[in-house]
Amino acid sequence: MRTNCIYRAPFDIRMATVKLFAALLLLVSEGSASSCSSSCCSCITGGGGSACASKCTSCSSDCQTCVEYGGGSGCIDDGRCDCSSSNDDNSGNDDGGGGGGCSTMKSVSSSQLACTFSKLSSSEAKEYASAMSSWLSGIATTSCHWAAFLGNVGTESDELTTWTQNPCNSATDAPYCGRGPMQITFSSNYEFCAGETSYCSCPTIGSDPELVSSDTDTGFGTAACVWGIMSGHSLSNDADGSLAGFKATACYINAGHSPCGDPNGWASRESYWYQANSCLGISEELWMEDFLKFNASQAANNNATTHMLRGNK
């Protein structure tokens, strides 16, 4: 019987080879992890602050630490975050069909909501973020959808601090005056949402409209109805990240049709939309030029100071 003769290198040589191979793998791994994804870089430069951390896992550890502590664009400027050759990662934060710069976003966090609406307490931000994320599940699916939604809600409900229109009397169609995050108004609209159980699950608001003001879930159910179906289509279809798209959503909410000229509270809605864009980390390429024009216009008309955007930290 013939046997094969196999040469076996000495043990110390084999171990040295293994260590060298492991070192090479580590070097390759660290090199590939140092370059940040484009979604991370867009979020950082867009003012997303610490909320960008989940998008920056492909970056170096120094970069991730900087982002977690809200370092913003300074993390790129000082070299800790490498955005010189950023590529999209596979984290699912693609454009989600919403246009370039609109990343997939299925829910809003309490920190993002608190960043957009500074009047909310931390407990309110947590409660409302959970409720709106639940009720708009499958309706708002990109960061641009959420920015447009929040831009309108900010004006309609004074940052979710006013859940009943003031005054609520015969002049404002009481008891069917504006209520909830989207300030649903008129008995016909209450009845409409009461019948849209797949959106609102609020069949009794026609007979008990005050429930929209007093119950968080019912309030956000009506907001989902207004956003998702009341205009005959989902307003997410209009919210493509552009100012024109956002204005279309405001027109449908305020006037019932688009175009509509400038809807009520347009300057306020626009201001909240810019703030939401910043807090959600939406690419500045989509909105910064319009924001600078808005600031210049506000300063010229009102002799006011320019709006400063808050970062999400």
Image (cartoon, rainbow, N blue to C red):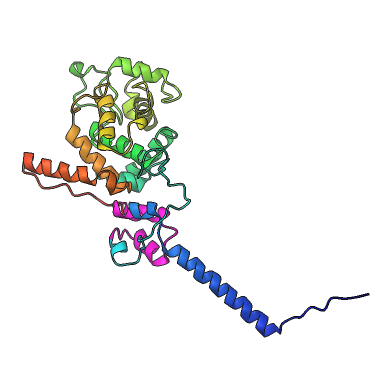
Residue 158 locus on image (x, y percent)? 23, 35
Left or right: residue 35 versus residue 7 is: left
Q: Is residue 288 left or right of residue 198?
A: left
Q: From what the image shows, is residue 294 above or below residue 226?
A: below
Relative to 282, is 253 above or below?
above
- Give the position of the C terminus as an image quadrant: bottom left
**Considering only vertical position in the picture, is 213 above or below 33?**
above
- Can you see residue 117? no
Foreground: 204 or 1?
Answer: 1
Give the residue at x 36% y 40%.
99
Near-viewer residue (264 or 209): 264
Count of labels shown? 0
248 or 220: nearer the viewer: 248
Confirm whether residue 290 shows in the render: yes
Magenta-drawn segment = 44-73
Q: Is residue 264 left or right of residue 249?
A: left
Q: Residue at x 62, y 81 (%)?
A: 16
298 or 164, nearer to the observer = 298
**Was residue 58 drawn as part of the magenta stretch in this picture?**
yes
- Give the position of the N terminus as an image quadrant: bottom right
Residue 212 image position (x, y, % from top left): 34, 26
Residue in the picture at 30% in, 36% down: 148
Judge whether residue 128 is colored magenta: no
Q: Residue 239 appears at what percent x and percent y? A: 32, 34
Asked where in the image residue 135 lies, by quadrant, the reply is top left
Task: Give the percent coordinates (x, y) of residue 119.
Answer: 24, 43
Q: Quadrant of residue 49?
A: bottom left
Relative to 195, residue 115 above or below: below
